[in-house]
């Protein structure tokens, strides 16, 4: 029955545009990830959730007592904890997606040889790419929901628009996971993989998570405004603080472009690696 099903799927793909890339079985890849996740180490996931919470209490309530209020750029001044909470939520979405779409994918490519096995079936490279990317964004979503569940009872959410921060976190995680997997597919050594952290840490520190970027010269501000995490923080901060402007759509468009480019590059790279 399994063989017949695989043959039937392959036959239905014949003549379709992109038949060599997409079989419509992305769900099978996600299902495999869910099964593997059930037997994985939950401590790894838990640490990714705890990290932004520790930052919130250490900086928001520790250093925040010394700082007082901060002007978020639009709207009235807010407490320092309220200012950094959106940045930490956006960072949680990014980290959750990046962890799964980089190191986990690298192991599967270089050591697990998982994708070779998948692509020996009726799955196409786009099925694999979408399945892995969607699964990675799911981890980012979990981190974001967990963090929101912490900050809401603390009184750091003052607008009903904050509900939209969760869908925004999904878009952010989707974009980072797509680009993360695309970049990882070009990595060949663990030393090269370390470059990912070299990029992520400065982006986290300088993208407006803890202070307005207006403290920098204009040319540095322009560089920061090109970074994806800055767009993520501005999008989530605008929603959580209720500062709704048309400019938020610009951030959404930025991530849509990231998603399209990342998914296309990942599919192309998987095809080049495993469909020779």
Image: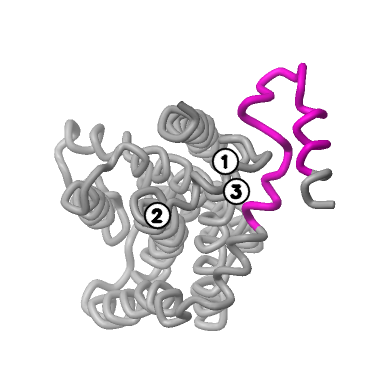
Residue at which label 3 appears: 131
* Disc sitting over residue 98 in the figure: 2
Residue at which label 1 appears: 119
Q: Crowding near pointer 2: few (<14 within 10 Å), some, many (20+)?
A: many
> Which residue corresponds to the image point at 26% horizontal and 40% vertical from the top-left?
224
- Quadrant location of the C terminus in the rendered image: top left
Q: Is residue 31 visible?
A: yes
Residue 26 part of the magenta-drawn span: yes
- Give the image location of residue 4, x and y in percent: 83, 44
Judge depth for marks 1 and 2 and give the one in front. 1
247 relative to 158, above or below: above
- Give the image location of residue 217, x and y in percent: 14, 38
Calculate the distance from the C-alpha at mark 1 to the C-alpha at mark 3. 13 Å
The residue lying toward the viewer, choosing from 1 and 104, is 1
Q: Earlier in the sequence, mark 3 or mark 2?
A: 2
Calculate the distance from the C-alpha at mark 3 to the C-alpha at mark 2. 15 Å
Q: Which residues are magenta?
A: 6-30
The residue lying toward the viewer, choosing from 154 and 137, is 137
Element class at badge 1? helix
- Give the image location of residue 263, x and y in percent: 51, 35
* Disc sitting over residue 92 in the figure: none
Asked if the residues shown at circle 1 and circle 3 are in contact, with their CB atoms under 8 angstroms apart, the answer is no
Element class at badge 3? helix
Q: Earlier in the sequence, mark 1 or mark 2?
A: 2
Judge depth for marks 1 and 3 and give the one in front. 1
Q: Quadrant of residue 63?
A: bottom left
179 relative to 67, above or below: above
């Amino acid at each position: 029955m399994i063989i017949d099903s695989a043959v039937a799927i392959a036959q239905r793909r014949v003549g379709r545009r992109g038949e060599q890339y997409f079989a419509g079985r992305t769900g099978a890849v996600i299902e495999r990830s869910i099964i593997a996740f059930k037997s994985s180490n939950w401590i790894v996931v838990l640490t990714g959730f705890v990290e932004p919470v520790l930052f919130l209490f250490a900086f928001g309530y520790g250093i925040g007592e010394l700082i007082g209020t901060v002007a978020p750029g639009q709207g009235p001044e807010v407490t320092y904890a309220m200012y950094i909470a959106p940045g930490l939520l956006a960072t949680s979405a990014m980290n959750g997606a990046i962890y799964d779409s980089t190191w986990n994918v690298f192991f599967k490519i270089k050591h697990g040889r998982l994708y070779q096995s998948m692509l020996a079936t009726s799955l196409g490279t786009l099925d694999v790419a979408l399945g892995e990317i969607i699964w990675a964004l799911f981890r980012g979503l979990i981190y974001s929901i967990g963090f929101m569940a912490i900050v809401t009872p603390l009184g750091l959410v003052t607008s009903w628009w904050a509900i939209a921060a969760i869908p925004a976190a999904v878009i952010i995680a989707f974009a980072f996971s797509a680009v993360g997997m695309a970049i990882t597919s070009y990595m060949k050594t663990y030393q090269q993989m370390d470059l990912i952290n070299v990029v992520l840490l400065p982006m986290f520190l300088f993208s407006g998570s803890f202070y307005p970027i207006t403290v920098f010269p204009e040319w540095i501000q322009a560089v920061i405004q090109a970074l994806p995490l800055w767009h993520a923080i501005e999008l989530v901060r605008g929603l959580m603080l209720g500062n709704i402007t048309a400019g938020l759509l610009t951030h959404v468009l930025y991530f849509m472009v990231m998603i399209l480019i990342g998914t296309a590059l990942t599919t192309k790279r998987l095809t080049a690696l495993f469909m020779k």
